[in-house]
Image (cartoon, helix red, strand yellow):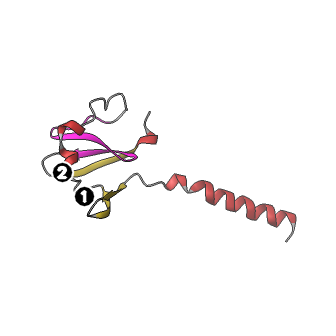
Amino acid sequence: MTASKLFASLTLAALCAASVPAFADDTSVTLDRPGVGQHEIKKGDKVPDEYKRKELALGDWQKRHLAAPGENEQWVEIKDKYVLVNIPNGTAKDMVMKSKVK
């Protein structure tokens, strides 16, 4: 293999590896729950009931640069995500990776 082909191959491999974080999934979060096992939650899915409790609501969502929750909604922190939860039906309306907000 010539030096130019090797360089081209290495450059392509580096670009592919660097693009993986760009596709990081901020539309789901995986919980490992005792007695239930791993459970992936995506937008539109029901969250465990505990995330509907007011005690888990993020009161400082403005400081975290999150959108204002609507009526009967609250932001909660689940692992590496902020999740907007509709309280009455318990569904995840939106998800944002914590690393994407300041």
Residue located at (23% from left, 53% from top): 47
Query: Disc 2 designates what residue?
Result: 49
Where does residue 91 sit, x and y in percent of width and height?
21, 52
Q: Is residue 93 left or right of residue 101?
A: left
Query: Disc 1 designates what residue?
Result: 45
Above/below status of 40 relative to 70: below
Question: How far apart are labels 2 and 1 at the CA level?
Answer: 12 Å
* Numbered range of the magenta stretch: 67-85
Q: Quadrant of the N terminus?
A: bottom right
Q: Looking at the image, which is closer to me, 2 or 88?
A: 88
Residue located at (32% from left, 29% from top): 62
Q: Nearer the viewer, mark 2 or mark 1?
A: 2
The picture quadrant where one finds residue 63 is top left
* Residue 71 magenta: yes
Residue situated furthest right in the rendering: 2
Above/below status of 62 relative to 56: above
Residue situated furthest bottom in the rendering: 1
Could one spot residue 80 in this view of the protein? yes
